[in-house]
């Protein structure tokens, strides 16, 4: 008996997103990945269907799905394109969720409606390590701040109509909302190992005025909650990558003939496929357990961190070993395996890192 029980609405969501991924993304994914281009037409289709603001309440124009449903949608999309899965996670978990939880009514009315109508929101990542070029350099001007500096990663930055910019002031942490274009704010492209079509950018700030009216304060616990929520979303992306690796490997193993028989009958290949399945099912239980705890209003912090860590490690392992199943063909860019492997590396580092997650898990269980 499965521990994961989807209700009828969630089953419908699974089927609809699976159909969308197969019919709308799969025929185009090889081209956009080879070119490294942002999937504008696909994202526009998602927007027209109202699928970019999945968790946004109905009174702001959203679909108001629960976290479990968001994970289902993200996993199905990420089986075909992890980049598009990540776009959904950023829009919902790192942009919509902070606004829903901590923004004022004016900010919610303006920006949640924009997201629900199909606009893309960006998120400016805080540096995990303070490098010289990423140091805060701000001065106070009345109730506003003037910021000059650099941020190495802006998620959804390529097409964002506005961005959420967390910054630690001398007194507290604030999330500023920056409309695009914004005086003094410039974006430049990044050439990443993986997730090459997700629209990640880097940002330069030249005396950018951060208006207090376009900000909301968050406590340290609030910021952790936002990261924990996004951990669940990103773990669903990793789950999709891992599942794609398994399905692709199984298909190849059943078709590839060597020494007169299908390689699926070789014990080494069978062991790899079985281990993939074991790891994926274990990760899936953790991901949907974290999502269900959030939906039930329970403490989900520890579960979200564990799910993120295990799912990302599973995606990496499946990406690497799907290459082994293909043998020499696995190292050719003609097949999607190298993309699974590259994407699994990048997804581990969005808004956190494996080392940071391990440290946070230790803090949770020891304090």
Image (spheres, helix red, strand yellow):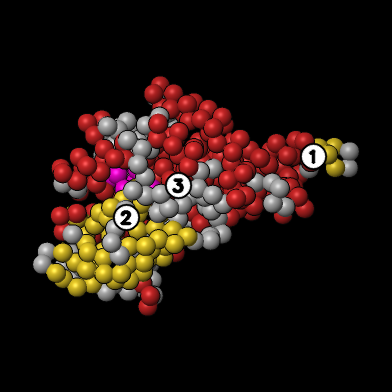
Estimate the x, y position of residue 239 in percent, counting from the top left.
51, 44
Q: Quadrant of the C terminus?
A: bottom left
Of helix, strand and loop, which one carries label 1? loop
Q: Nearer the viewer, mark 3 or mark 2?
A: 2
**Residue 181 — which label?**
2
Q: Residues within 10 Å of mark 2 (few under 14, many from 20)?
A: few
State which tag comes first along the sequence, 2 or 1.
2
Q: Which residues are magenta?
A: 90-97
Name the residue furthest top. 8
Q: Determine which residue is flagged by label 1.
A: 256
Estimate the x, y position of residue 304 in percent, counting from the top left.
37, 49
Give the residue at x 57% y 31%: 22
Q: Where, by quadrant of the figure, is residue 127 drawn?
A: bottom left
Q: Is residue 167 above or below residue 270?
A: below
Of helix, strand and loop, which one carries label 2? loop
Task: Locate residue 226 relative to residue 307 in the image: left or right.
Answer: left
Distance CA(mark 3)–CA(mark 2): 23 Å
Q: Is residue 25 above or below residue 199?
A: above
Distance CA(mark 1)–CA(mark 3): 32 Å
Q: Residues within 10 Å of mark 3 (few under 14, many from 20)?
A: many
**Residue 156 — which label?**
none
Distance CA(mark 2)–CA(mark 1): 52 Å
Q: Determine which residue is flagged by label 3.
A: 86
Q: Nearer the viewer, residue 242 or 204?
A: 204
Residue 88: tell me if it is visible: yes
Of helix, strand and loop, which one carries label 3? helix
State which tag comes first along the sequence, 1 or 3.
3
Give the residue at x 26% y 37%: 113
């Amino acid at each position: 008996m499965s521990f994961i029980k989807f209700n009828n609405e969630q089953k419908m969501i699974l089927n609809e997103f699976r159909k969308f991924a197969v019919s709308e993304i799969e025929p185009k994914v090889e081209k956009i990945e080879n070119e490294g281009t942002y999937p504008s037409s696909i994202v526009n289709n998602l927007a027209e269907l109202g699928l970019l603001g999945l968790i946004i309440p109905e009174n702001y124009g959203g679909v108001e799905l629960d976290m479990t449903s968001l994970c289902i949608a993200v996993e199905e999309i990420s089986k075909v394109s992890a980049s598009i899965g990540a776009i959904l996670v950023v829009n919902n978990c790192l942009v919509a969720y902070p606004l829903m939880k901590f923004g004022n009514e004016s900010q919610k009315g303006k920006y949640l409606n924009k997201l629900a109508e199909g606009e893309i929101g960006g998120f400016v990542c805080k540096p995990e390590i303070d490098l010289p070029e990423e140091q805060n350099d701000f001065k106070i001007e009345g109730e506003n701040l003037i910021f000059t500096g650099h941020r190495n990663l802006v998620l959804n930055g390529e097409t964002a109509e506005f961005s959420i910019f967390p910054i630690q002031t001398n007194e507290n942490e604030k999330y500023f909302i920056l409309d695009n274009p914004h005086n003094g704010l410039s974006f430049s492209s990044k050439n990443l190992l993986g997730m090459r079509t997700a629209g990640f950018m880097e940002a330069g700030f030249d005396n950018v005025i951060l208006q207090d009216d376009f900000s909301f304060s968050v406590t340290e616990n609030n910021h952790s909650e936002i990261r924990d929520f996004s951990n669940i979303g990103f773990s669903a992306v990793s789950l999709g990558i891992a599942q794609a690796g398994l399905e692709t490997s199984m298909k190849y193993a059943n078709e590839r003939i060597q020494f007169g028989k299908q390689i699926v009958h070789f014990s080494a290949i069978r062991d790899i496929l079985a281990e993939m399945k074991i790891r994926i099912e274990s990760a899936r239980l953790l991901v949907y357990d974290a999502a269900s705890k959030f939906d039930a209003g329970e403490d989900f912090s520890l579960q979200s961190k564990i799910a993120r860590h295990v799912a990302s490690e599973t995606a990496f392992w499946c990406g690497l070993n799907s290459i082994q199943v293909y043998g020499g063909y696995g190292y050719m860019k003609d097949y999607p395996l190298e993309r699974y492997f590259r994407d699994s590396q990048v997804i581990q580092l969005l808004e956190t890192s494996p080392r940071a997650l391990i440290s946070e898990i230790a803090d949770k269980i020891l304090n």
